[in-house]
Image: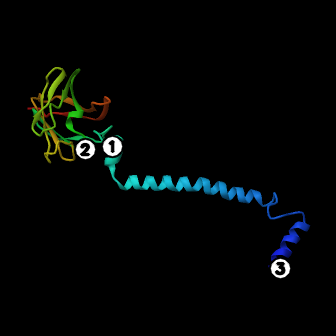
Amino acid sequence: MRESEDSIRSLEVQGQTRDSPDTRPRKIAKIVAAILIVPLLLLSGLAVISLLEGPEDVCTSILGDAPTFPIGQFYVEETDTTTAKITFSTVFCDAPPSHLRIGLKVDDDYSWFSFPNNESGATLTVISGENIATIVYYDLEQNGRVELGDYLAISGLTADTEYTISLIWEDTGDRLDSDAFTTPSG
């Protein structure tokens, strides 16, 4: 106890006290640092938790309704003179097919197709343009969601012709993917 009183008197003799201007900035800096660090740690923890919960949380709206914007791609798996198989290759955030539109272009003609329902085996309906082909959707899991491996079977194509197929998210009109393919000559 005697030593601490002596050190306080020593500081007072030198013109400083425990709460002098020389020590206050350090205390304020510590308080400010604590105020800034705590929210940053909380936000970092929330970010880690959301990453661990998986892509479903990123893809669904706040209300948990249909996806606000899916992420996905397809590719042309095989073609012959009059048919093509287009396979979905990445996750679509549980997007029901009825939220998608398919565009099929040959020369300068576009056909736009919609899914009449979310069932496997559904023949897509032409909603705009010439009916240049028939497209049937196959849902491998039979769950009403576009997922890896689901595919579109296109028939009624013309041999030795270049086509472009596009995948559109109906809710926003954004193009998710597009691919070109050529049917072999007969």
- The location of residue 44, given as percent across then percent down, is 48, 54
Q: Residues within 10 Å of mark 1 (few under 14, many from 20)?
A: many
Please tell me which residue lies in front, 42 or 158. Answer: 42
SS class, disc 3? helix
Residue that mark 3 sits on? 2
Q: Residue shown at 13%/38% (left/top)?
A: 119
Q: What is the number of the mark on residue 94?
A: 2
Q: Quadrant of residue 108?
A: top left
Density class for disc 2 (Cα within 10 Å; few <14, some 14-19, many ≥20) is: some
Provide the secondary structure element on which disc 2 rests: loop
Q: Is residue 41 left or right of residue 173?
A: right
Which residue type carries mark 1?
Cys
Q: Nearer the viewer, residue 48 or 110?
A: 48
Report, in whole angstroms, how far the alpha carbon at label 1 lies from the one at label 3.
67 Å
Residue at which label 1 appears: 59
Front label number (3 vs 2)? 3
**Picture quarter containing residue 105?**
top left
Which residue is outermost to the front?
A: 1
Q: Position of residue 88 (x, y in %)?
A: 21, 43
State the CA–CA distance, disc 3 to disc 2. Answer: 74 Å
Tags 2 and 1 touching, CB below 8 Å:
yes
Q: Tell me which label, 2 or 1, sits earlier in the chain.
A: 1
Please tell me which residue is depicted at 27% across the width and 32% down the height of the picture: 168
The location of residue 16, given as percent across then percent down, is 86, 63
Precedes in sequence: disc 3 or disc 2: 3
